[in-house]
Image: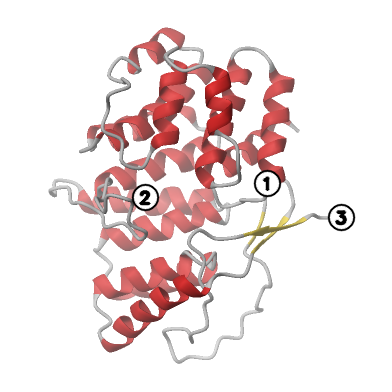
Amino acid sequence: MKRILLFAAVPAILFSCQPSTDSTSEEVVKDYEAISLLGDTLRSASPNEALLERFRMHETNFKADPSADNWIWYGRFIAYQGKYNEAIKVYSEAIEKFPNDARFYRHRGHRYISIREFDKAIADFTKAAELREGMENEVEPDGMPNARNIPVSSLHGNIYYHLGLAHYLKGELEPALEAYQNAIGASRMDDNVVSGTHWVYMILRLMGKDEEAKKVLEPINKDMDIIENFSYHQLCLFYKGEMSLEELTGAGDGTSSANDAVNYGIGNWHRYNGDIEKAKEVYEAILGKGGWASFGYIGAEADLARMK
């Protein structure tokens, strides 16, 4: 019997509006978002009222002016509820109208990752990269601003970061490595450096390139100006030997996506240091927390699927 996993989307908002088109769909309406790589049924939990207010604002803006910018925000706040299939549909409609706007492929690709359709994600991110080739990079606004209200990511960085993730989740380490290296190259802030370095380090260790992995940690230090990617910073310091496993394990307590990232890094650390059973134990613990849309969760799920 399949397990049914609920995911409290962060942020989570109740999607109560009508689709952006007036046509009547004859598609069968699913009561779940995806089937996991292990065969589990994945559903999103009920959202909260505070973020519903933000969604309504973007919905109103979109209906009054369906510009590319408003369409982006409309889709993002649908996805923040855990309504990934609905968000994909909205982005697909937008692509029909704005076929050369890389942002729609970038965001749709992200949500294809959420529902475990990695090949479609790769196709979208590859298209986005082609559309942005030769263009100046730009800051990507945060859907949920950090404590300092300073966006830390860029469009080019996010395209390559998520392209790397999609390849990684398929077990395609070489293209994943290239994409993450491109993401670091597009970095503008320390937050991007630590997030990209975390994935590059893990990939190189999984490839058995331990010396190269050690070398990529050289720019990492305790004095970096980290605004939101504290978990990735701590992981990199751990890999470098400047933070203990006990300290890192404490940082991984809880159920947030950041904690999944820490625990997944710990699981992989056990794995490429030869303790496969401990790695499996950590992966299973991540899945037990139920945050099925986090990257750490999907990584653990993909690894367990391959191991089985």
Residue 198 lies in quadrant: top left
Name above or below for residue 229 compared with residue 52.
above
Visible in this render: residue 95? no
Distance between mark 3 and mark 2 Cα atoms:
35 Å
Which residue in the structure is indicated by mark 1? 289
Which amino acid type is marked by label 2?
Phe
Q: Residue 289's x, y, as percent?
A: 68, 46
Mark 2 residue element: helix
Name above or below for residue 173 compared with residue 20.
above
Quarter holding the C terminus? top right
Mark number displayed over residue 125: 2
Residue extending furthest toward the top: 211
- The local crowd at label 2, few if under 14, some if 14 to 19, many if 20 or more residues have their Cα within 10 Å, is many
Residue extending furthest toward the right: 1
Mark 1 residue element: helix
Residue 281 lies in quadrant: top right
Sequence order check, earlier mark of 1 and 2: 2
